[in-house]
Amino acid sequence: MIDLKLLQKDFKNVSAKLTRKGVSQELLDDLKNKNEELKIAKTDFESLQALQNSMSKEFGVYKREGKDISELKAKVDANKIKIAEALDIQRQKQESLESLAMSIPNMPDDSVADGEDEDDNIEIKKVLTPSTFDFTPKEHWELAQQNGWIDFERGVKLATSRFSVSFGMGARLERALINFMLDFNRSRGFDEVSVPSLVNRTALEGTGQLPKFEDDLYKMEEMELFLIPTAEVPLTNLYQDEILTKEELPKKMTAYTSCFRKEAGAAGRDTRGMIRQHQFHKVELVTIANPNESEKIFDEMVECASDLLTALKLPHRLVSLCTGDLGFGAAYTTDLEVWLPGQNTYREISSISNTREFQARRAKIRFKDGKKNSFVHTLNGSSLAVGRTLVAIMENNQNEDGSIDIPEVLKPYLNM
């Protein structure tokens, strides 16, 4: 959640930053009005409290001097009722502002370039040179069918469109990738964690998926539980409403989970193959950090994901997202895009973001900073999306006859 104190102190600057992220003027005006209403409600409450304190002192003087206190007492009692009413109004105004603020995205960092969509993102660098083929490379769904690795029709038969079933070496490779990624991340200092695939509403509010993206989530109505869209949600919320010590930070975590997304806003996009599935496997990186260390840790997380792709010998590039492509909770993000020769393009395979205090404020995650409690910074990133990594392995390691070479680093996990 955005800093409401900063909003009250410097509305002009905050609104200018939010405008860069695409927040409408109508929403900003509503935010400003609710902010002003809260200010007025607080002033009214404080004025009544000041009057009450003044009358209480006068009440004591009257009693000591033996004066008649009946009229003053009546005023004090009447003012108590006004104070209670004013406090209730202040509470309502605070809740109204906070409710609206929950739908407001994080402010982009000043370093983030302005832009409308992914076409305006800025390439940072390329890593590894894509291989050239003396034949026309196939796309992954052709290779998957030819090798018997993935069956999309049976996925539809069991569930609906955008589900798939992995067989034989396809299934074994998925498991090998998961184990390889977790081991790799542990070697970089990330503790492995196993978390639930179902979380409550509070957890999703804490990381920013709710209330804005409820239509993209699978929900168990009778229990008010949701299937996770990413391990970022349970990992970050492990420390929801807690005060950590300075010495406990950073908390660097990695987890494998299945993830579930309706992709309600992505109709018609990547409907064929494994690029955009309703259920997919992912290994995640999450760090709870001291604000003084978050930029350094961000670079470490980007390097970790990039080195994973390099170990798999998959050409990729690093891209800095513009304001129009930046996620709801992110202050800044670097995407890793892997080369897919079958599609002759780079496609996103990881997204590393620093949300700064945004999620911590929503989830109430703090640390003891000297004599005061301060909000931590939270960072998250894919490391990596397993299905998309398998797609990249298939397309980059294919042979003219359709066979696929296995990356050397995965062979020990396959007993090869």
Image: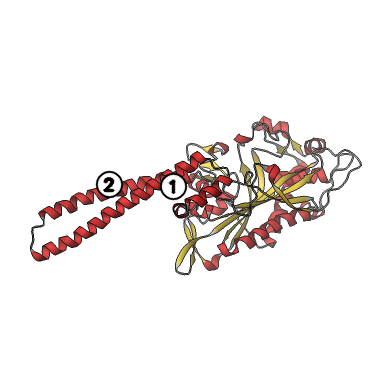
- Given the image, on which type of amino acid does mark 2 rest? Glu
Label 1: few (<14), some (14–19) or many (≥20) C-alpha neighbours in 10 Å: some
Label 2: few (<14), some (14–19) or many (≥20) C-alpha neighbours in 10 Å: few
Q: Say which residue appears at 55% left-offset and 45% top-offset.
A: 19
- Given the image, on which type of amino acid does mark 1 rest? Glu
* SS for callout 2: helix
> How far from the left and from the top, in percent, is residue 50?
26, 57
> How far from the left and from the top, in percent, is residue 364?
47, 55
Relative to 33, is 300 on the left or the right? right
Q: Which residue is mark 2?
A: 85
Asked whether 140 or 94 is in front, the reply is 94
Q: Say which residue appears at 19% left-offset and 58% top-offset.
A: 55
What is the CA distance from the residue labelled 2 to the residue labelled 1?
A: 20 Å
Asked whether 71 or 179 is in front, the reply is 71
* Labelled disc at residue 219: none
- Regarding residue 133, the answer to whether it shows in the image is yes
List the single residue furthest toward the right.
Answer: 134
- How is the model colour-coded? secondary structure
Asked whether 130 or 413 is in front, the reply is 130
- Regarding residue 197, the answer to whether it shows in the image is no
> How far from the left and from the top, in percent, is residue 141?
77, 36
Q: Is residue 142 above or below residue 49?
A: above
Q: Say which residue appears at 46% left-offset and 63% top-offset.
A: 373
* Labelled disc at residue 98: 1
* SS for callout 1: helix
Asked whether 56 or 214 is in front, the reply is 56
